[in-house]
């Protein structure tokens, strides 16, 4: 199973955002929606062996985590609005400490980065990490940040984690996922 976790520093934690204004009312929810699309979509198919965790850290709080499972997800189309509608529905249902399914393959719970890091061993995708093209093995679970850098507190939580880079330049989060999946596909074929 391949896993991606994306920290959305401004992403709202309620379903009150507008599908017509994902960058503004959603707290850059558009960035997270592009990460969902990059994690799952192939030409005329979906990656069934992927899970994507969105860690929403914005207002009104508390932090929430939305999980998409490729093997189960339904109603997902390759556009930001479709992903956003599924996230909005997930955030509209009451949630607790355990994942609760909102639509097939989409789950939500309270809790953020610290909790997820305690459950799954991740590698950090970072420009200063080991190049994925020369790394002997690639991580199956990776964490990355949205359009903001990780905060000092987040960095401290991941201080001892392995770090990998997809190249010498800083890329958008969704592009980073695409490049890493491409390298994984090449090694698997």
Image (cartoon, rainbow, N blue to C red):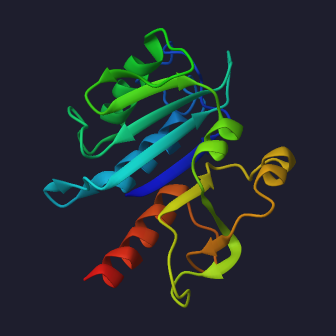
Spot occupied by residue 156 in the image (x, y as percentages of width and height): 84, 52
Q: Residue at x 45, y 71 (%)?
A: 180
Spot occupied by residue 133 in the image (x, y as percentages of width and height): 51, 87
Q: Which residue is at the front of the view, 18 or 133?
A: 133
Residue positioned most to the left: 44
Spot occupied by residue 57 in the image (x, y as percentages of width and height): 67, 31
Q: Which residue is at the front of the view, 84 or 134?
A: 134
Spot occupied by residue 95 in the image (x, y as percentages of width and height): 50, 14
Residue 158, relative to residue 31: is it above or below? below
Residue 71, relative to residue 176: is it above or below? above
Q: Residue at x 48, y 32 (%)?
A: 66
52 horizontally vs 70: left or right = right
Residue 168 visible: no
Residue 120, relative to residue 94: is it above or below? below
9 horizontally vs 79: left or right = right
Residue 132, relative to residue 126: is it above or below? below
Residue positioned most to the top: 94
134 horizontally vs 83: left or right = right
């Amino acid at each position: 199973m391949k896993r991606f976790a994306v920290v959305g520093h401004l992403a709202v934690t309620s379903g009150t955002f507008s599908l017509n204004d994902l960058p503004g009312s959603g707290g850059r929810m558009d960035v997270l929606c592009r990460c969902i699309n990059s994690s799952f979509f192939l030409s005329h198919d979906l990656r069934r062996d992927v899970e994507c965790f969105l860690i929403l850290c914005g207002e009104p709080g508390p932090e929430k985590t939305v999980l998409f499972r490729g093997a189960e997800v339904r109603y997902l189309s390759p556009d930001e609005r479709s992903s956003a509608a599924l996230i909005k529905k997930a955030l509209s249902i009451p949630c607790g400490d355990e994942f609760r399914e909102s639509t097939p393959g989409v789950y939500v719970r309270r809790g953020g980065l610290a909790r997820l890091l305690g459950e799954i061993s991740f590698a950090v995708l970072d420009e200063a990490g080991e190049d994925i093209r020369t790394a002997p093995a690639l991580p199956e679970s990776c964490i990355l940040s949205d359009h903001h850098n990780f905060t000092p507190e987040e960095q401290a939580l991941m201080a001892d984690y392995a770090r990998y880079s997809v190249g010498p330049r800083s890329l958008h989060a969704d592009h980073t996922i695409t490049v890493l999946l491409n390298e994984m596909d090449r090694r698997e074929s």
